[in-house]
Image: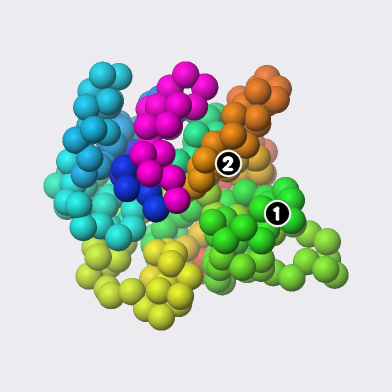
């Protein structure tokens, strides 16, 4: 099975221009993400998809492979779809260039589970990661997209507001994390389907699948991660890195003694 990683990256972020190249613990942020993806060992190749000559130049300095895309992309999914149109692969994995807290172990942990889901349930359009929201500040921050899933891990809805209401259960919200697995078919559906009202209202591209009753499965990585959307996010990420204690890498899925049950289709399968 051929699997390629694609890191969409741009310079013209509204709230943090040039954030792709901001320094995170000694490396440009996009290079830090690329390095983690490469070191995960799960990809045949990892590309940085960008329309920026500046980002492409920095990538070459670190031997990362830039893939020049059109400049009109309004979301990362359409940018990786352009790559998918030109490079053949069984699976395409989007890794957010603004997720510097992703480690090789987190990526492997997610990919082992995600590949199992995609192989056993071909009707799944995408598999994405989610993580707990650790504070009320994170919950109400509209840059964090909160995800609500059914009991089987399939997305019901995603919003920039704090959902679900947790006043009774006390359970934390779950937020979207920018690493997701797609097939060429699902990416083709995305680019050939116009955005719906919910996607436009929330400014969240994965809702395009949900509005058409496509299955998006979420896997909880149970890690403290944070996307960098503002300069203050960068400072928070640096604080987390400085205080992150060394711990063993997460083992591969095949080493876990557990089942995946009641995934899309309602069947029960033992892994």
Note whether residue 169 is visible. yes
Provide the residue span drawn in magenta.
15-34
Q: Is mark 1 on a helix, strand or loop?
A: helix
Note whether residue 96 is visible. no
Q: Which residue lies furthest to the left in this view?
A: 86
Query: Which residue is at a point 21% across and 44% down the rendered structure image?
Result: 51
Provide residue 211's location: percent of width, then percent of height.
43, 77
Vertical relation: 216 (above or below) 242: below
Q: Distance between the residues labelled 1 and 2?
A: 13 Å
Q: Name the residue under label 2.
A: 232
Query: Which residue is at a point 49% across and 47% down the rendered structure image?
Result: 229
Q: Is residue 251 left or right of residue 217?
A: right
Between 233 and 201, the one nearer to me in the picture? 233
Tag 2 or tag 1, which sits nearer the N-term?
1
Q: Is residue 252 left or right of residue 61?
A: right
Between 31 and 52, the one nearer to me in the picture? 52
Query: Which residue is at a point 62% across and 49% down the rendered structure image?
Result: 131
Q: How crowded is mark 2: few (under 14 residues within 10 Å), some or many (20 or more)?
A: few
Whether 26 is among the magenta residues is: yes
Q: In which quarter of the image is the C terminus?
A: top right
Residue 258 is labelled as: none
Q: In this view, does 46 lie to the left or right of 37?
A: left
Residue 160 location, quadrant:
bottom right
Q: In this view, does 72 lie to the left or right of 271?
A: left
Q: Mark 1 points at which residue?
A: 137
Question: Depth-wise, is mark 1 or mark 2 nearer the camera?
Answer: 2
The image's colouring method is: rainbow
Whether 265 is among the magenta residues is: no
Vertical relation: 146 (above or below) 22: below
């Amino acid at each position: 099975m051929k699997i390629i990683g694609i890191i969409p990256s741009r310079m013209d972020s509204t709230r943090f221009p040039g954030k792709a190249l901001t320094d995170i613990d000694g490396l440009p942020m996009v290079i830090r993400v690329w390095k983690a993806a490469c070191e995960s060992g799960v990809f045949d190749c990892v590309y940085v998809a960008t329309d920026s000559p500046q980002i492409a130049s920095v990538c070459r300095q670190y031997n990362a492979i830039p893939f020049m895309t059109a400049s009109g992309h309004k979301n990362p999914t359409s940018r990786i779809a352009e790559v998918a149109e030109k490079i053949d692969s069984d699976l395409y994995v989007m890794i957010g260039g603004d997720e510097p807290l992703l480690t090789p172990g987190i990526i492997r942990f997610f990919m082992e589970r995600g590949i199992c889901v995609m192989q056993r349930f071909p009707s799944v359009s995408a598999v994405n990661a989610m993580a707990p929201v650790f504070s009320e500040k994170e919950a109400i921050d509209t840059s964090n997209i909160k995800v609500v899933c059914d009991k089987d891990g399939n997305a019901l809805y995603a919003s920039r507001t704090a959902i679900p209401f947790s006043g009774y259960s006390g359970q934390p919200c779950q937020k979207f994390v920018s690493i997701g697995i797609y097939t060429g078919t699902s990416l083709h559906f995305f680019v050939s389907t116009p955005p719906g009202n919910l996607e436009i209202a929330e400014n969240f591209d994965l809702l395009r699948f949900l509005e058409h009753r496509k299955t998006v499965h979420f896997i909880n990585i149970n890690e403290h991660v944070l996307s960098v959307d503002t300069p203050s996010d960068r400072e928070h990420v640096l604080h987390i890195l400085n205080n992150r204690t060394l711990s063993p890498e997460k083992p591969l899925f095949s080493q876990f003694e557990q089942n995946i049950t009641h995934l899309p289709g309602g069947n029960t399968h033992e892994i």
